[in-house]
């Protein structure tokens, strides 16, 4: 059941979360939290997303707040560290925030940087953790991807390369030219009308899936089951969520019957402050369970009145796509 618009907006909070370093081109993350009978949910589509695309994020927040999480298969979920496109000298400090984690996802193909920067960053990560995956966010052409990934592979294995190119045909070609390397699809799944197209075309060995863009935890589980029929494992990842959104990601990951890879749900360390204290990592894992935002942090991190009005109006427009 979808609650009324007034029920969604009543008791909601629009927050502005400062970040430790620029990530995905931003230094402040705005999110809107909603509260329902089952707890808290999050609505935080990036500002450039249109209302129709954002409706999946609203559906996801409503599911968390009104329906709660699905039944879990495990209590804890193994996570990876996330390393932004920082200079190699900053890598040890970032990885120190992830005690016990043995896998790191490293951002590459950042605008204004070179392949040499990527190689040095990945090399610095390899010195600390044994498993490394890279994420280009579709930033390379096929030739650039093959060149860069070949250089990275000279130093050692990569667990996979996430979205090295933007389009499905390009991903297929990268897989053909680098047969020994797994290719993971992210944007080609979460921003696609048909999230299975990239798999049917032979463009992905691994699927990176995110709760909010897919419309909620149960929608993610349904897609994970369909991907499993193609033999493609999933990695549940964050959409740069607050602790509330992360808890939905952990709940979804905990409910997947077979979880082969560490999940990208440790992005809370990218924030200077969050809506509640960060969960302590235990042997590189996070505990599945709901979170309760701290009232003092809700007040301290509150966005300006202008931004609150902007988000409320966005919810009103987006809500129209739910029915």
Image: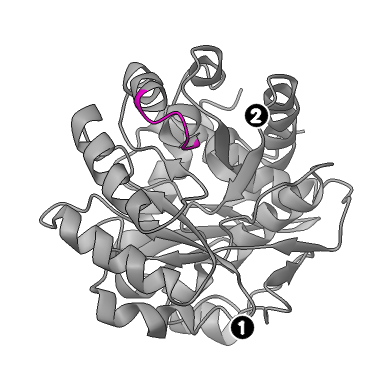
As helix, strand or loop, the secondary structure at mark 1 comes to loop
Q: Earlier in the sequence, mark 1 or mark 2?
A: 2
Is residue 116 positioned above or below 227 on the image?
A: below
As helix, strand or loop, the secondary structure at mark 2 comes to loop
- Report the side of 42 relative to 27 (left or right): right
| Residue 63 picture quarter | top right
The figure's colour scheme reads one colour
- Report the side of 293 relative to 213 (left or right): right
Q: Range of the magenta residues?
A: 177-182
Whether 254 is among the magenta residues is no
Disc 1 residue crowd, few under 14, some 14–19, many 20+, Cα 10 Å = some
Is residue 39 positioned above or below 173 on the image?
A: below
Q: Whole-percent x and y of residue 23?
A: 31, 62
Q: Whole-percent x and y of residue 310?
A: 34, 52
Q: What residue do we see at 30% from left, 81% from top?
A: 90
Residue for badge 1: 277
Quarter of the rendering occupied by the C terminus:
top right
Q: Whole-percent x and y of residue 121?
A: 30, 67
Magenta segment main secondary structure: loop
- Tell me whether the residue at label 1 lies in contact with that at label 2, contact meaning CB atoms closer than 8 angstroms: no
Given this view, does label 1 or label 2 mark the residue nearer the observer? 2
Q: Is residue 305 visible?
A: no
Checking the image for residue 232, the label placed there is: 2
Label 1 – label 2 distance at C-alpha: 34 Å
- Report the side of 279 relative to 152 (left or right): right
- Report the side of 191 relative to 110 (left or right): right
């Amino acid at each position: 059941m979808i609650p009324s618009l007034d029920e969604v907006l009543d008791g909601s909070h629009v927050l502005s979360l400062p970040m430790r370093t620029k990530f995905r081109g931003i230094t402040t993350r705005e999110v809107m939290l909603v509260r329902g009978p089952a707890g808290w949910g999050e609505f935080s589509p990036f500002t450039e997303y249109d209302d129709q695309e954002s409706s999946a994020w609203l559906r996801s927040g409503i599911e968390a707040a009104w329906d709660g999480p699905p039944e879990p298969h495990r209590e804890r979920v193994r996570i990876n560290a996330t390393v932004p496109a920082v200079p190699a000298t900053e890598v040890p400090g970032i990885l120190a925030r992830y005690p016990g984690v043995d896998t790191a996802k490293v951002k590459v193909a950042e605008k204004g940087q070179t392949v040499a920067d990527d190689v040095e960053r990945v090399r610095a990560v390899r010195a600390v953790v044994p498993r490394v995956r890279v994420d280009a966010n579709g930033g390379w052409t096929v030739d650039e991807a093959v060149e860069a990934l070949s250089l990275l592979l000279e130093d050692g294995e990569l667990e996979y390369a996430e979205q090295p190119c933007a389009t499905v045909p390009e991903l297929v070609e990268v897989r053909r030219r680098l047969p020994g390397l797994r290719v993971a699809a992210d944007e080609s799944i979460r921003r696609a009308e048909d999230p299975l197209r990239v798999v049917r075309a032979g463009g992905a060995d691994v699927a990176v899936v995110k709760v909010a863009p897919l419309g909620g935890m149960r929608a993610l589980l349904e897609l994970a089951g369909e991907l499993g029929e193609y033999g493609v494992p999933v990695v549940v990842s964050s959409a740069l969520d607050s602790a509330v959104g992360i808890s939905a990601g952990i709940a979804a990951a905990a409910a997947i019957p077979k979880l082969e890879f560490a999940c990208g749900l440790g992005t809370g360390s990218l924030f200077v402050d969050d809506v509640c204290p960060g969960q302590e990592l235990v042997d590189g894992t996070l505990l599945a369970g709901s979170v309760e935002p701290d009232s003092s942090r809700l007040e301290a991190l509150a966005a300006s009145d202008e931004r609150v009005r902007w988000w409320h109006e966005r919810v009103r427009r987006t809500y129209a796509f739910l029915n």
